[in-house]
Image: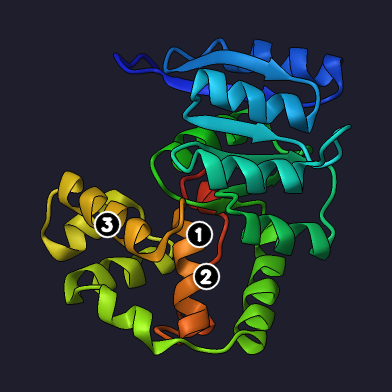
Amino acid sequence: MTCCHKIRVLLAEDHIVVREALHQLLEREGDLEIVGEAGDGEEAIQQVSELSPDVAIVDIAMPKLNGVEATKQIKARYPATAVLVLSAHDDDEYICALLEAGASGYLLKNVRGQVLIDAIRMVHAGEYVFHPVIGRKVVNCITSTHQDKPQKGELLDQLTEREMEVLKLAAKGMSTKDIAERLALSVRTVQAHLGTVFSKLQVGSRMEAVLVGIREGWFDVDDMEITDRLSQQGTKV
């Protein structure tokens, strides 16, 4: 697959052999460009600052600064960079923490290479994606978050009716293209609406915006479709 604008990718993984294998896998794709590599969390943040990658692939268990804290700082300082977690860990505490930190996706290291490639493209497009095992735990995290957090009605006044409509469809797991088709809008218009929503809610990803919506009671967790969107596209996990 070729593209005039390549997706700039940063690899943050402390195991050199794994990092080299990822580099070799991804550099075969015409629309992906590996712009940097990091062996620990502090270096990952520095590389994001210097290179402004579109997507950072982050492991959890890294020296100096773990993946959770690295993700939190990356999203706080450089919200335009989407974070895709690739880890061997599927512990609930990590998943919930990474959702809070602003990760757009969470895959386990036993996925096929094509699944990872598709996931990079998806999070770059503003979508979120989770391994099937992770997806079920994401629902639990969101449910517990909704129960623990008080609702704040004042945020509702900040969004227009159209912006809320777009956010609700995004919460269902619909792609930007699908939302555009449903609402008879252009893809660029939907992207603009989502960008405005992110700005108003002070978040850096679709997943973070959905979490805010759940907390505020704008829609119920049962309305969401936290599924493995990659498998919907026919990619085996």
Q: CA distance from mark 1 to mark 2?
A: 6 Å
Residue 12 seen from this side: no
Q: CA distance from mark 2 to mark 3?
A: 16 Å
Disc count in the image? 3
If you read the primary sequence from the N terminus, does the residue marked by circle 1 or circle 3 appear first?
3
How packed mark 3 is, by other alpha carbons closer than 10 Å (few <14, some 14-19, many 20 or more), is some
**Quarter where residue 42 is shown:** top right
Q: Which residue is mark 1?
A: 207
Query: As rendered, which of 127 and 161 lies closer to the eye?
Result: 161
Looking at the rendered structure, the kind of residue marked 2 is: Leu
Q: Which residue is mark 3?
A: 196
Instruction: Locate residue 127 relative to residue 134 in the image: left or right.
Output: left
Looking at the rendered structure, the kind of residue marked 3 is: Thr
Q: Please provide percent x and percent y for residue 158.
A: 27, 74
Q: Secondary structure at mark 2?
A: helix
* Mark 1 and mark 2 residues within 8 Å of each other at the beta carbon: yes
Residue at screen point 63% across, 59% down: 99
Instruction: Locate residue 111 relative to residue 26 in the image: left or right.
Output: right
